[in-house]
Image (cartoon, rainbow, N blue to C red):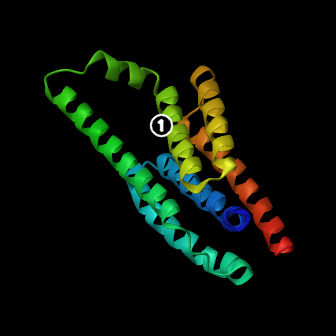
Amino acid sequence: MNEKINLKQIAKNAYTSYHQDGILDISLAIVIFTFAIMIIVDMPWLGGSIGILAMFFYAGAKKVFTVPRLGYVKFPKQREQRILTAMVVLGFLGFALGLLVFTQTESGGTPSWLLFLTDNYMLAIGGIVSFLFLLGGYTFQTKRMYTYTLLVLTIFVVGHFIYYPLEYYLLLLSTIMFAVGILMMIRFVSKY
């Protein structure tokens, strides 16, 4: 029994160490930063392609920084199932929300709840992005994502009351995340 507990603890430590390299933070910061720049240059529709590039960056950076120091970590099926569940939930919620908005607006008018969301878009965006970080924290079992959830909520609630364009808040968020990611990477490289 004691051996099982030790093996579980070792697996948990390996998983935690695998995500302490700052690469996830840097990847997300690059996506948010690029999306803010695309809003500034009025091309936000390109934002989806940046996610694909960020996945390539994430995988490449893991091979360069993490795998040589920790080795390749094969995670248990339970963790893979958690990631799959999060992706399915995220996909379903996105589809359901899109379908709801489409059917409501195509029925001849804009419903009051949608007008409320557009009037309070900073709170709506903050809530959605916070939910994504919350889901990321659950999926990757990293407490930093919960901290980012609170940071996003704080930034966007303040942004609701103190008006600056959305892209400034996105730039602030990406800068903080990038700095945290770089600090974590420096600590990770010096430790391992």
User: According to the image, label 1 marks what residue?
Assistant: 128
Tell which of 11 and 54 is nearer to you: 11
**Could you say where residue 93 lies in the image, as x and y percent from the top left?**
34, 41
**Could you say where residue 171 lies in the image, as x and y percent from the top left?**
63, 46
- Image quadrant where residue 9 sits: bottom right
Dot 1: within a 10 Å radius of its alpha carbon, few (fewer than 14), some, or many (20 or more) residues? Answer: some
Q: Secondary structure at mark 1?
A: helix
| Image point (47%, 29%), residue name | 124
Camera sees residue 43: no
User: How many numbered discs, if any?
Assistant: 1
Residue found at the very far top of the displayed protein: 112
Name the quadrant of the C terminus: bottom right
Question: What is the three-letter code of the residue carrying label 1?
Answer: Ile
Residue found at the very far left of the displayed protein: 107
**Could you say where residue 19 lies in the image, as x and y percent from the top left?**
67, 63
Name the quadrant of the N terminus: bottom right
Tell which of 30 and 136 is nearer to you: 136
- Vertical arrangement, residue 98 with respect to residue 73, above or below: above
| Image point (76%, 66%), residue name | 185
Q: Determine whether, in the image, residue 99 is placed left or right of residue 22.
A: left
| Image point (44%, 51%), residue name | 86
Q: Determine whether, in the image, residue 102 is placed left or right of residue 44.
A: left
Residue found at the very far right of the displayed protein: 190
**Could you say where residue 26 lies in the image, as x and y percent from the top left?**
65, 60
Residue found at the very far front of the displayed protein: 1
| Image point (67%, 62%), residue name | 12
Camera sees residue 104: yes
